Image (spheres, rainbow, N blue to C red):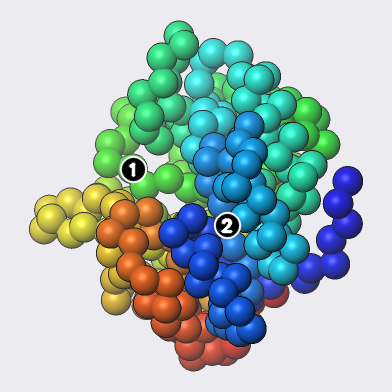
Amino acid sequence: MKSRAHNFSGFGLGFRPQHFPDILGGANAADGVDWFEIISENFIGVGGMPMRNLMRVSDDYPIVMHGVSLSIGAPDPLDRDYLQGLMDLAERLQPEVISDHLCWTGAHGVNLHDLLPLPLTAETLVHVADRVGQVQDFLGRRIALENASTYVTFTADARSEWEFLSELSERADCELLLDVNNVYVSAFNHGFDAADYIAGLPAKRIRQIHLAGHENNGDHIVDTHDAPVADPVWDLYRDTIRLLGPVPTMIERDANIPPFADLVAELQLAREAAGKAGHGAAA
């Protein structure tokens, strides 16, 4: 097992292969970036140059693993082959965090390739908490679950999403990945107060923060990850840091990916926002 001496704090970016020459292109190539997040599925079972490049990055920077296929709320049994691949990758990288989403992605062996919402009921809470426990027992470590952006709710909902996440994190003894953009998107779409969502989460469980861009269509917002972070999300992020204190924060960009220098410049905005909130370094 690879030994790590990294201190997981500060501000990170999603690792994208096209940026590898920039990241390890020489002294001070990635100044302004404290750590990188990978999409787990992009590297499970992968070898060759992509893995060698990632291992080179991991020698110099803390790595976090973020997944989209755990399907923690699905009715099907957990995919043990997927979990084994996740564990094998974690053994190689020794990531600071392993995360996925509070959602389901399919059923009966069909993957719908979307992060679908769950009914926020007592039955769902028991089901998801049990599955989180199974995953954590398998991996031998806590995982973090992220709030996904949502566009519909269920008539059966018996609690708010932040209440559900709070109860889940305590019952399953897991961590949370707070996506501030997703809070803003869901609050706009469903008409709740984003500040109530942030305030209702257990600060001690929040391991990491995501920021990303979205598409505002007037009467609804779509989480797209293809644009810079919007001004109201920056405002919500500053309020979040004032409330929670410093939390390791990253910017996600999954489409219309700009040059590496542009992302580093946007990440500097996160540092400045945290500084204005009274916490200059997320730890």
Which residue does the image show at 77% across and 50% down from the upper left? Answer: 94
In this view of the protein, can residue 12 be seen by the observer?
Answer: yes
x and y, in percent, of residue 230 in the image: 29, 71
From the viewer's perspective, is residue 124 above or below residue 88?
Answer: above
Label 2: how many Cα within 10 Å (few below 14, some 14–19, many 20+): many
Q: Nearer the viewer, residue 265 or 181?
A: 265
Position of residue 241 measured from the top left corner of the image (x, y, whole percent): 54, 76
> Residue drawn at (47%, 64%), measured in percent from left and top?
19
- Counting the numbered discs, the total is 2
Distance CA(mark 2)–CA(mark 1): 23 Å
Q: Based on the displayed image, in which of its 4 quarters is residue 57 positioned?
A: bottom right
Q: Which residue is mark 1?
A: 150
Q: Position of residue 127 (x, y in %)?
A: 60, 23
Mark 1, secondary structure of its residue: loop
The answer to whether residue 192 of the structure is visible from this angle is no
Q: Mark 2 belongs to which amino acid?
A: Glu
Q: Residue at x 63, y 67 (%)?
A: 35
Quarter of the rendering occupied by the C terminus: bottom right
> Mark 2 sits on what residue?
37
Q: Position of residue 131 (x, y in %)?
A: 65, 25
* Residues marked 2 and 1 touching at CB (< 8 Å): no
CA neighbours of label 1 inside 10 A, class few (<14), some (14 to 19), many (20+): many
The residue furthest left is: 218
Q: Which mark is residue 158?
A: none
Residue 12 drawn above or below residue 221: below
Q: Residue at x 39, y 59 (%)?
A: 253
Three-letter code for the amino acid on which mark 1 is drawn: Thr
Q: Mark 2 or mark 1, which has the lower sequence index?
A: 2
